[in-house]
Image (cartoon, rainbow, N blue to C red):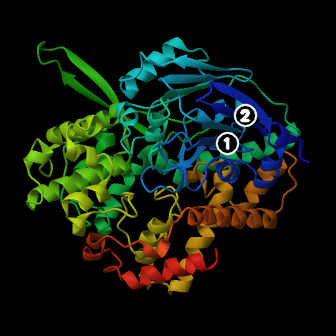
Amino acid sequence: MVEWVKTLSRVLYIDLTRKMCWVEDRTDLFEEWLGGIGVATQLYREEVSKEADPLGPENAVIFSVGPLSGLFPMASKTVAAFKSPLDGYFAESHAGGRSASAIRYAGYGAIVIKGASDRPVYLVVESEKTRFRDAGALWGMNSLSAGRVLREVTGGAGFRTIARIGRAGERLVHYACVTTETYRHFGRMGLGAVFGSKNLKALVIIGSGGFKLPNVRAYRETYRNLWELAVRSPVAKKYHDLGTAENVMPLNEIGALPTRNFSSGRFENAEDISGEEFARNVLARRVACSMCPVACIHVAAIREEYEDEKYFFKTEFVSYDYEPIYAVGSNLGICDRFGLLKIFHVLEAEGVDVISTGAVLAWCTEALEKGIISENETIIPLRWGDWKNYIKAIQYISEQANDFYKTAAKGVQALASKYGGRDFAVSFNNVEPAGYHTGPLFISSLIIGFRHSHLDSGAYSMDQKIIMSGGKLPSTSEAARIIREEEAWRQVLNSLVICLFARGLYGKENVVKALNSLDYNLSEDDLTRLAWKIYTTKNKQKIEEGFDPLGIKVPKRLLETPTPLGSINEQYIREVVEKIFDRIK
């Protein structure tokens, strides 16, 4: 056995119903499945039955880190596994901040939270104790305020992560998120609603411990090499300089920037909301996750004069990124940067996933435009570009102000099922898509994704390479192969748990070097076998829960709006998905 595995194998179990916690040695899991998503999948299989209600006490939330967490550059992410309230299947969401280091240096490899509290609580986890704290005073507080209060009343500043929900999570908005520290989120798939269903307002983890490295010289040498590669990489420079917001203009130029509910791939005012314009006009600072030298999180300052005090201003800091810019920017026809940042601020405060919220608001706007619904439902007029009313609508969703907004809190598909407008309801199996209308490979990956993020298998990038090369679409067999192989390898990266922006840095050779500096003695072939084992297990789990990939339709709107690779052929998508799953059966 690798001794280093023992430092990772403590799993903290927390039962909210009984207010109990205990620690188990799960060396068996970390030895076989490495960590991260590999271990989280196994813990999920042990804890969550296929009949479990996603918003019932029988659902569990599993946080897991990997053997490189807190040690190597950009090994900065934590995996959360749970059953999603959006689609009812096994799902995962990843976040950075200080979460991975805090879990690791509190002495755990994973934390399992199950049951449901009879009253609002927050948890404070340290290496030797876990405390259940009354969250009555925090319940009803927005995510930003709750974070500020918890920073004041809990110790461990500098070693601590604070994961909490806003009012949307408390009210079980199905796409509510969990925010960690500031500006980082377990954004997709509704983890915030699962927290809310458990009466869990927040999870504070204080990691102030340490470990003795098995081979300091090997570690230092490997670390130095990876650090140099990270800071000198052109990709890292891109993420540092402009962040993912840099993607706005290239995607718009090729016609892949979703605009006004995916009715177009080009936004006439894209330049106004580009990464370049944000940086020139409002960028205040860049923020990094723990163990990351890149600092890809871009934070804008917005300055507003108080209505009743002339020459007195308040300044708010708001993070921005490509996906929010697409979701509530081009996809809602908004080009006002100030208005866009005000929307981001409200989304942060309420604690909702920006991608799903943007898709819901886009559907509402088009449905209102077409007369399918009226202001009797929306309360206010929703028009493309009208950011002030979109802010009110976000608050109505969070509050669930009437029956219409109660339905909107369940997503686009729920709205279309009740009110009509299926032709322009853009979601896959009740989950709204990331913002890349690049072509059929990305759409195929959206059908099968666990995170419903562009990082599931990175197939948007495969589409873009075909576009740039001027080549033809691959055969469906070839498309299935490259998507499957990329996604399988990402299971190793997600078991370590590496930020996928560093996927170019952590190729097989460097992963082997990093692990073997900790005495793992693994080969590239060993990792390849593990990748396929995790990939297959995850997909089988979802299928056992009832997932039918061939039963999922491509939204009609995506078939109507041409991509840079032409119109989408639904039969091509179907064959790709079918061939991906042939390997899993």
Work out whether residue 292 can be spotted.
Answer: yes
Mark 1 element type: loop
Q: Position of residue 31 (x, y in %)?
A: 82, 50
Q: Amino acid at mark 1?
A: Val
In this rendering, would 33 be left or right of 426?
right
Instruction: Identify the disc placed on residue 108.
Output: 2
Q: Nearer the viewer, residue 89 or 286?
A: 89
Q: Residue shown at 21%/18% (left/top)? A: 313
Q: Which residue is mark 1?
A: 65
Residue type indicated by callout 2: Tyr
Left or right of 382? Residue 358 is right
- Quadrant in which the C terminus is drawn: bottom right
The secondary element bearing badge 2 is classed as loop
Write the residue at 73% across / 34% down: 108
What residue appears at the point 85 percent right and 50 percent down from the top-left corner? 520
**Above or below 20: residue 88:** below
Asked whether residue 107 is in view, the answer is no
Closest to the observer, 109 or 291 = 109
Indicate the position of residue 346 as horizontal and vertical percent values. Answer: 29, 34
- Residue drawn at (26%, 66%) of the image: 265
